[in-house]
Image: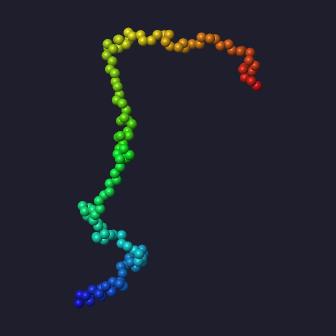
């Protein structure tokens, strides 16, 4: 009795379709359900991976270092040197005469320049 009822239901299902399977994209024979089956969702448990991960190995000097702080030029600056002057140091510096006026070049001209005031056209050629 149960097998007869089951075969009858299967034959009825072949002719009676769901309303969304009559027309539209679901009516195509190539249509596949978007939801995966429970057996396809997670084939392997996360704790039991069938293959081991392949970790590439290389010489450490040929591998590019992606860390930012090793390439940050602001961190590579030498430390700032600060000098604290005391009153005795300042008085000693003021008493020192480390240069003479003759050590510097003379800023003024030592020769006179004679200009021709009678140039035709003010010195410009026509």
Q: Camera-side residue: 102 or 86?
A: 102
- In the rendered structure, the answer to whether residue 125 lies left or right of residue 25 reads right
Q: Quadrant of the C terminus?
A: top right
- In the rendered structure, the answer to whether residue 29 lies left or right of residue 45 reads right
- In the rendered structure, the answer to whether residue 102 lies left or right of residue 118 reads left
On screen, 53 above or below 118? below
On screen, 103 above or below 83? above
Residue at 42% x, 12% y is: 98
Q: What coloring was used for the rendering?
A: rainbow
Q: Position of residue 15 (x, y in %)?
A: 36, 85
Q: Quadrant of the N terminus?
A: bottom left
Q: How many marks?
A: 0
Q: Position of residue 39 (x, y in %)?
A: 28, 70
Q: Camera-side residue: 110 or 24?
A: 110
Q: Can I make out residue 66 in this image?
A: no
Residue at 28% x, 70% y is: 38
Residue extending farthest to the left is 1
On screen, 58 above or below 70? below
Residue at 72% x, 20% y is: 123
Task: Determine the image quadrant of residue 112.
Answer: top right
Residue at 24% x, 61% y is: 47
Task: Determine the image quadrant of residue 3.
Answer: bottom left
Q: Position of residue 107 (x, y in %)?
A: 55, 14
Q: Camera-side residue: 26 or 84?
A: 84
Q: Can I make out residue 110 in this image?
A: yes
């Amino acid at each position: 009795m149960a097998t007869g009822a089951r075969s009858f239901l299967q034959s009825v299902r072949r002719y009676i379709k769901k309303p969304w399977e009559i027309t539209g994209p679901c009516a195509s024979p190539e249509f596949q359900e978007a939801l995966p089956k429970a057996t396809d969702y997670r084939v392997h448990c996360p704790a039991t991976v069938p293959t081991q991960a392949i970790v590439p190995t290389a010489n450490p000097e040929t591998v590019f270092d992606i860390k930012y702080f090793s390439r940050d030029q602001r961190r590579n600056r030498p430390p700032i040197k600060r000098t604290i002057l005391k009153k005795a140091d300042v008085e000693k510096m003021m008493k020192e005469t480390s240069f003479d006026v003759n050590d510097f070049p003379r800023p003024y001209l030592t020769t006179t320049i004679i200009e021709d005031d009678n140039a035709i056209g003010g010195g410009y050629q026509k």
